[in-house]
Image (cartoon, grey):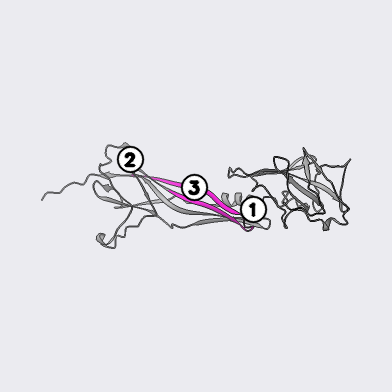
Amino acid sequence: MRLSSRVPPLLLTSAFLLLAVPSVSSAANLPLGDGPGGGIVGGSPEAVVVMGRSGPIASWSSSGGGRGPTLTCAYYEWGGGLPVLVGGIGAPTDPVPGREYLFGCVDASRQMVHSRLVVYDPGDPFAGVAAAERALDEARRRLDLPLPEPALNPPGAQLVGVATWLWVDGPWQALEATATVGAVSSTVTARPVEAVWSMGDGTTLTCGAGTPYDPTRDARDQDSGCTHVFSRSSSGRPGGSYPVTVTVTYEVGWSASTGAGGTLGTLTRSTSAAVVVQQAQAVIR
């Protein structure tokens, strides 16, 4: 974090902010933090707690299970262009809407990672801290990945020794969700990368979306890279069928209007269907 040469570093010990303040004529002339949102150093936070004189004001914890820092923040009185000191120590205060305060955050090692002057808005008690990450959490919650729709040909019962075509019905495309916190928006994007078919007879196939079979075309003019041949009927199986499951894997990433972003790993969605496989009967004339 860059600090003005006129402003020494701010240090928190326990619940107090120790302020060594030079002479300044106006709080408006005191640049704190990096840019309009203040600077965060040490990685994107995974949790933020805002403390007041009477106790916690607000808290947020990422649902992503990351390993970023936890920030402890507080509002401090700022009057007449100088901090309001009590015996040289400024204690956190319970902020009043519309009033200006010094807002500071420390990490787990008590190092100051964020500081800026703000007007308290109860609609955003975090004063913009971790806005991209908080928007990411909401966008992730809004992301709606549909269950895959398994499709097979021949339709209905399958035949021993006859290739079964497999594909996933519906669009095979990236899906997005966006959320906004204050002036910051974050978008989560999920792209399907593979479909894994568990055929219920011990066979597993890894495919893409697969190729739909077109009954209006000659079978000799069509080809699929995702087929399976059952070698036994399902008559002796529980329920007289094979439990066929298709699992679609999505690669997930995110980006924010601040320029932040990255990968979020993978998500999967699965659907199962009972598939009857019959033994083809020879017809003797």
Label number found at residue 248: none
Residue at the (30%, 39%) spot, across then down: 240
Q: Earlier in the sequence, mark 3 or mark 1?
A: 1
Return the residue nearer the eye: 75 or 96. Answer: 75
Magenta segment main secondary structure: strand
Name which of mark 3 and mark 2 comes first in the sequence: 2
Specify few, some or many for label 3: CA neighbours under 10 Å numbering under 14, 14-19, or 20 or more: some
Residue position marked by numbered label 1 in the rendering: 132
Position in image of residue 160 (x %, y %) = 24, 46
In magenta segment, residue 193 = no
Q: For the residue carrying disc 1, how many other residues have a C-alpha within 10 Å: few (<14), some (14-19), or many (20+)?
A: many
* Residue 242 in the image: above or below residue 257: above
Please determine whether, in this image, residue 214 is positioned above or below residue 269.
below
The residue tagged with tag 3: helix, strand or loop?
A: strand
**Label 2 crowd bin: few (<14), some (14–19), many (20+), radius 10 Å:** few
Left or right side of 214 for 249: right
Looking at this view, is 30 or 155 the one in front? Answer: 30
For the record, the magenta segment spans: 248-274
Furthest residue toward front = 5
Figure label count: 3
Q: Amino acid at mark 2?
A: Gly
Task: Tell me, yes or no, if residue 144 can be seen here.
Answer: no
Q: Where residue 102 appears, x then y in whole percent? A: 80, 50
- Among the two numbered marks 2 and 1 on one chain, the one whose residue lies closer to the N terminus: 1
